[in-house]
């Protein structure tokens, strides 16, 4: 395992060093003392393991495709934004816009996520161990969001084909979001996904798993129909 | 884009290293706002006197203006201290106030007297516990001028500014004292979009605005709410509906520090709280710089209002 001591280095120094190590064949790199610097570990396109031994700032692991990223502290705004593939895990809390517009891969926030989680996502999987804030899943087109705790207001607003599962309370559903009964397939999916990524949260308790609410689009906003003007007025 | 920070010592220690902590956090946020920096720091008064930080102005004749202020204010009460640092005059004066806290009365008369001596003069802060210093330049420069890092007290706010719409000068930088309301100060990151409307309402009531900076209205607004009898937390709660736009702001009085975040969570603001202290900052980098990794930091949610009493 290679180590990068971040003290005294700029973001550019650290990111260049990561790329050099990967080019040299290194597959397991640990960043010591990142102290919440922004833009760390962005645009990594290889299946390597990156560990941040502390908190990271904005846009960590943005635009990546392939790496397994572990963040031992918390993360700032735009965590894993626009990622294509790989896995990003945060031990602590994540800031606004975590996993916004991802197209693939998995983002795990073990504690809480702030506002605008997974907005406009086009694929992939987001798992939050705690609660999420305002407007999670806004205009999400495809992919899955699992929130084990409570959600903020405007949850799953104006979604397309993404699917959300919520273990706790939903403060308020967004426009055109509807609650649906999870299928047996959904329960199996939740069980396997959560036991893999957050084993301590749910374990194998069927009661907890069966209490998850499924939220999908009501499809009222997909096509404009002038008879439903009232729905549009409300949504806009 | 601006950076704001707040710190409160919760251990009843009135000699906490507030200046050093606020400055460390502010320095870490320096890149968010490279044009101006300022702090609002609080410590209990030694003798119940009021401390004033007065801007003497950037034009020539500052020394003369300082002398005439020092002479003139003797009519208001016993003057404990007069000191000039850079473009500031610092005054410590006994002021008998009838009602406390209050807009108007002796606090206003003293402010009006000082500011009547020259149009360039501004009372930047007044209060029994509050002192504001701010200037164009970096947090490091602010410390070099005013020895901010040696200040000990109970709590404080800090601001590093990237001006987007109004002038870059001392008066337009933050924190803002809520003029005429002793000890009330604010720092703001964002944009108040109903500023002109609110300003118009307050001006019709006779409130003087000192700058074209929209953030100034937050202090005026909170002073108005508190004067009407709202508690500190209630005033911050009310601001969520009365202020429009994007905002994360911190406000403080002698007893309280608190923040409010707009209903769309447009602007970042994170905080950490332990039994010993509360720290709030625009970016986590500021909290890590001052306190290290050992604390859980979380982003405030949309419509969050949190208040702590010292």
Image (cartoon, helix red, strand yellow):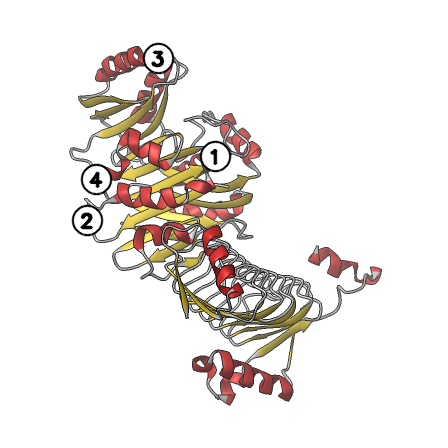
Q: Secondary structure at mark 2?
A: loop
Please check whether the numbered discs 2 and 1 fall on a single chain: yes
Task: Pick whichever of labels 4 and 2 is earlier in the sequence.
Answer: 2
Q: Residue at x 64, y 87 (%)?
A: A185
> Is disc 3 in the same subunit as disc 1?
yes
Which tag, 2 or 3, sits closer to the chain's start?
2
For image coordinates 29% across by 38% down, the residue present is B41
Q: Secondary structure at mark 1?
A: helix
Mark 4, Cα crowd under 10 Å, few <14 / some 14-19 / many 20+, is some
Residue linked to disc 2? B13
- Dot 2: few (<14), some (14–19), or many (≥20) neighbours within 10 Å? few
Residue at (52, 77) in percent of width and height: A167
* Residue B245: image location, x then y, percent: 56, 43
Q: Nearer the viewer, mark 2 or mark 3?
A: 2
Q: Which residue is mark 4?
A: B44
On whether disc 1 and disc 4 are found on a single subunit, the reply is yes
Tag nearer the camera, 4 or 2 = 2
**Residue projecting furthest to the front:** A24
- Left or right, A229 with respect to B301, comes to right
User: Residue under mark 3: which chain is it in?
Assistant: B
């Amino acid at each position: 395992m290679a180590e990068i001591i971040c003290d005294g280095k700029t973001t550019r120094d650290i990111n260049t060093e990561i790329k050099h190590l990967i080019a040299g064949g290194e597959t397991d790199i640990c960043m010591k003392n990142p102290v919440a610097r922004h833009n760390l570990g962005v645009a990594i396109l290889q299946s390597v393991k990156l560990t941040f031994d502390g908190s990271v700032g904005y846009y960590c692991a943005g635009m990546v495709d392939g790496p397994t990223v572990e963040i031992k502290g918390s993360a700032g705004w735009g965590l894993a934004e626009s990622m294509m593939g790989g896995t990003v895990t945060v031990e602590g809390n994540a800031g606004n816009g975590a996993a916004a517009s991802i197209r693939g891969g998995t983002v795990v926030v073990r504690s809480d996520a702030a506002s605008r989680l997974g907005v406009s996502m086009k694929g992939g999987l987001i798992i939050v161990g705690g609660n999420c804030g305002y407007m999670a899943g806004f205009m999400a087109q495809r992919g899955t969001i699992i929130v084990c705790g409570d959600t903020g207001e405007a949850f799953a607003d104006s979604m397309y084909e993404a699917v959300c599962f919520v273990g706790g309370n939903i403060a308020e559903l967004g426009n055109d979001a509807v609650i649906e009964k999870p299928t047996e397939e959904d329960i199996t999916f939740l069980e396997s996904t959560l036991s893999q990524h957050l084993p301590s949260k749910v374990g194998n308790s069927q009661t907890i798993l069966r209490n998850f609410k499924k939220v999908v689009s009501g499809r009222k906003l997909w096509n404009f129909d002038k008879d439903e003007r009232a729905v549009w007025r409300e949504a806009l | 884009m601006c950076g704001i920070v707040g710190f409160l010592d919760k251990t009843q220690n009135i000699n906490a290293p507030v200046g050093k902590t606020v400055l460390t956090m502010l320095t870490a946020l320096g890149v968010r706002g490279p044009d101006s920096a300022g702090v609002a720091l609080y410590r209990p008064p030694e003798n119940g006197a009021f401390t004033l930080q007065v801007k003497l102005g950037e034009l020539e004749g500052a020394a003369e203006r300082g002398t005439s202020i020092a002479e003139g204010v003797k009519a208001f009460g016993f003057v404990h201290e007069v000191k000039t640092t850079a473009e500031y005059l610092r005054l410590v004066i006994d002021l008998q106030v009838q009602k406390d806290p209050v807009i108007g009365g002796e606090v206003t008369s003293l402010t009006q007297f000082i500011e009547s001596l020259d149009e360039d003069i501004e009372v930047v802060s007044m209060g029994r516990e509050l002192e504001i210093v701010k200037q164009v330049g970096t947090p490091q420069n602010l410390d070099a001028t005013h020895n901010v890092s040696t200040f000990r007290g109970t709590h404080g706010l800090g601001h590093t500014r990237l001006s987007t719409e109004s002038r870059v000068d001392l008066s337009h930088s933050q924190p803002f004292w809520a003029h005429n309301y002793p000890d009330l100060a604010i720092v703001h990151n964002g944009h108040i979009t109903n500023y002109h409307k609110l300003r118009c309402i307050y001006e019709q009531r006779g409130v003087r605005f000192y700058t074209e900076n929209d953030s100034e209205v937050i202090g005026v607004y909170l002073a108005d709410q508190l004067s009407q009898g709202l508690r500190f937390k209630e005033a911050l709660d009310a601001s969520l509906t009365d202020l429009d736009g994007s905002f994360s702001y911190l406000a403080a009085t002698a007893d309280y520090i608190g923040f409010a975040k707009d209903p769309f969570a447009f602007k970042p603001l994170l905080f950490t709280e332990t039994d010993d202290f509360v720290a709030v900052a625009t970016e986590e980098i500021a909290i890590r710089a001052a306190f290290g990794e050992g604390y859980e930091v979380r982003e405030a949610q949309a419509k969050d209002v949190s208040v702590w009493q010292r």
